[in-house]
Image (cartoon, rainbow, N blue to C red):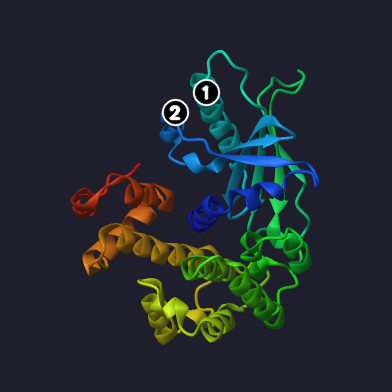
């Protein structure tokens, strides 16, 4: 998947209701109960992708995957995660029925031609009735800014640089909406960071990231630059000319995510990572995946995290 998943999962945890409402028919009452978190889903290491809900008073579970593109392995991953998720829910309440589960794959880039509205992973023998799973496909990069804005949340505004009709003028309005809609400066910084990560993916070749950085800086008077790690890396990236479009597509998105991992390290440890620690974060993200590195940054405490970064990399 695209490593932008890390950024989006953090935002989704902040605004789970805004995530869920985009996929619930309008007018139906919903209640957010929290994220599924159990030892079984911990095996899969992405426990915050399944959200407990009540829709019209009935229990439901919403499973959301963020992916860079709708590649051939995405249906397999959806089916695999559903296996972990179903087992976890059944073990938690062995005498209760497992709540109905809906899966949504949010796609950040891909072909210009419209993606299908649904996908499937068939497991039945040829000629037998269907068995397996279906999932909804939400190709946010094929939507317009108006369609994303209509979802009514700053969470969905961070996807606007992916929109086919994104322009500098439209994104300036988006920056202002995020400024007004975020709850605090910390959340604004996270939303703006996600906005820049999405601009780095740039599926339509808009090349608006440098302009977007300037818009955020103008609006927030240096908020990003005052944010530990992120601000310094933005300044360094500008100095090297990386925001002029020299890096493209998924490679640019991966670099942005590595920056976010450094910021997460700073929050956990209370200091900036050293040069060697930054190098270790980057190498581990490339070798074992950014999701695994993020999980370690969240799970390990203090010196244990520092020791882990100093150990030889164990390839998965």
Left or right of 88? Residue 284 is left
Q: Quadrant of residue 59?
A: top right
x and y percent of residue 180 in the render? 62, 73
Q: Which residue corresponds to the image point at 54% horizontal and 20% vertical from the top-left?
A: 90
Q: Which mark is residue 40?
A: 2
State whether residue 245 is above or below residue 202.
Answer: below
Which comes before the other along the chain, label 2 or label 1?
2
| Residue drawn at point x = 49 percent, y = 56 percent | 3
Circle 2: is it few (<14), some (14-19), or many (20+) Cα within 10 Å? some
Dot 1 lies on which element?
helix
Q: CA distance from mark 2 to mark 1?
A: 7 Å
Mark number, residue 179: none
* Residue lying at 45% horizontally and 36% vertically, measured from the top left: 44
Question: Which residue is drawn at the image coordinates 33% and 61% (left, top)?
Answer: 267
* Quadrant position of the C terminus in the picture: top left
Is there CB contact under 8 Å for labels 2 and 1?
yes
Side (left or right) of 23 relative to 267:
right
Asked whether residue 295 is in view, the answer is yes
Q: Would you say residue 70 is visible in this rendering?
A: no
Is 316 positioned to the left or the right of 257 in the image? left
**From what the image shows, is residue 237 above or below residue 190?**
below
* Quarter residue 230 falls in: bottom left
Q: Position of residue 33 (x, y in %)?
A: 58, 38
Q: Position of residue 178 (x, y in %)?
A: 61, 71
**Res 34 quadrant in image:** top right
Q: Which mark is residue 87?
A: 1
Please count the marks in the image. 2
User: In x, y percent, where is residue 60?
Assistant: 66, 32
- Badge 2 marks a residue whose secondary structure is helix
């Amino acid at each position: 998947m695209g490593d932008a998943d890390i950024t989006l999962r953090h935002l989704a945890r902040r605004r789970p209701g805004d995530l869920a409402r985009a996929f619930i028919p309008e007018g139906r009452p919903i209640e957010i109960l929290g994220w599924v978190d159990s030892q079984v889903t911990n095996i899969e290491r992405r426990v915050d992708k399944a959200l407990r809900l009540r829709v019209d008073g009935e229990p439901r579970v919403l499973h959301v995957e963020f992916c860079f593109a709708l590649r051939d392995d995405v249906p397999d991953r959806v089916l695999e995660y559903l296996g972990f998720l179903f087992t976890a829910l059944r073990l938690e309440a062995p005498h209760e029925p497992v709540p109905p589960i809906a899966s949504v794959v949010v796609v950040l880039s891909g072909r210009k031609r419209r993606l299908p509205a649904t996908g499937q992973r068939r497991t039945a023998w040829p000629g037998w009735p269907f068995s397996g799973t279906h999932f909804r496909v939400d190709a946010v990069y094929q939507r317009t800014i108006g369609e994303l804005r209509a979802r009514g949340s700053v969470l969905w505004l961070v996807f606007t640089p992916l929109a086919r009709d994104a322009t500098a003028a439209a994104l300036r309005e988006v920056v202002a909406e995020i400024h007004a809609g975020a709850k605090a400066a910390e959340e604004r910084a996270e939303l703006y960071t996600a906005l820049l990560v999405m601009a780095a993916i740039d599926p339509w070749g808009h090349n608006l990231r440098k302009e977007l950085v300037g818009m955020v800086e103008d609006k927030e008077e240096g908020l990003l630059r005052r944010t530990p790690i992120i601000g310094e890396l933005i300044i360094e990236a500008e100095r090297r000319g990386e925001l002029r479009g020299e890096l493209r597509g998924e490679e640019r998105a991966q670099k942005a995510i590595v920056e976010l991992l450094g910021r997460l390290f700073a929050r956990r440890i209370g200091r900036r990572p050293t040069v060697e620690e930054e190098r270790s974060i980057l190498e581990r993200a490339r070798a074992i995946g950014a999701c695994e590195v993020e999980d370690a940054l969240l799970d390990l405490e203090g010196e244990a995290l520092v020791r882990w970064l100093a150990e030889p990399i164990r390839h998965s």
